[in-house]
Image (cartoon, grey):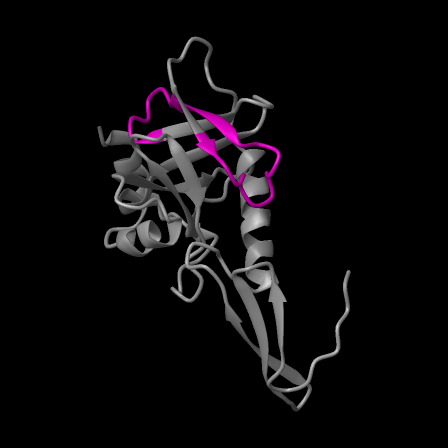
Amino acid sequence: MLTLTRREGESIAIGDGIEITIVDIGRGKVRVGIVAPRHMAILRSEVLGRIVEENQRAAGALSPSPDGVDASRIEFVNGLPGLRDHRAFTLAEVPGYPALRGLVSETDPLVRLLVCDASLAMPGYPLELAKQRAGLGDEEVAVAVVLTLPRDARAPSVNLLAPLVIGLSSRRGEQVILDGSGLSAREELALGSREPLAQTA
């Protein structure tokens, strides 16, 4: 780790496009200002930590997909937080649940994520905000959220804070983090929320 000493008002440049400025120092806190390209997510480490934890929980909770399911390939160029070694996934149907899909890692088929359309999980979901954060330009996209099925009798949860935005023509995806939106990384799905996911075509 590089350690630098900076005074209030002084900056640090990282590459050509990132500048960090010390805005204020006082009362045991340092306030920093960050200038970076719009497509780059700037997050507090504790927020990123929650997303990493939820992705890892979700990847370990989905049962194996049935053999012979035809599916589409999606590439997450930057990987997913907590699953950075898994960039290419196969999108598979989940028998009996037409509104759900399984993302199966091509690197390790035991790594699977269960996803659904974000607006099914939460009516009024901020789809436009998710699209803007993904930086996929004018391409038509799908916005999905990751579900976690607990191994015990608890209700499933959904990660509303970090949706997956997938370009429909490029088949490239990005997991964006809607920091500051008030959305939860682990929102419990009520019993009434499960039936529409199972019945929606």
Relative to 185, say whether 164 is above or below.
above
In depth, the one of 60 and 52 nearer the eye is: 52
Q: Give coordinates of residue 119: x percent, y percent.
A: 27, 46
Q: Residue furthest top?
A: 68
Q: Is residue 78 left or right of residue 124?
A: right
Percent of width and height locating residue 175: 45, 45
**Residue 38 shows up from this direction:** yes
Q: Is residue 125 visible?
A: no
Question: Relative to the observer, which residue lies in front, 63 or 3?
Answer: 3
Q: Quadrant of the N terminus?
A: bottom right
Q: Is residue 34 magenta?
A: no
Q: Position of residue 154 (x, y in %)?
A: 49, 44
Magenta region, main secondary structure: loop
Q: Going by the image, does 12 lie left or right of 3?
A: left
**Residue positioned 38% across, 23% down in the render:** 94
Q: Is-magenta flag for residue 91?
A: yes
Q: Position of residue 138 (x, y in %)?
A: 26, 44
Furthest-front residue in view?
16
Quick one: quadrant of the C terminus?
top left
Q: Which residues are magenta?
A: 75-100
| Up-down relation of residue 133 to residue 200 (above or below) | below
- Residue drawn at x 40%, y 65% is 182
Residue 85 in which image quadrant = top right
Q: Residue at x 30, y 36 (%)?
A: 197
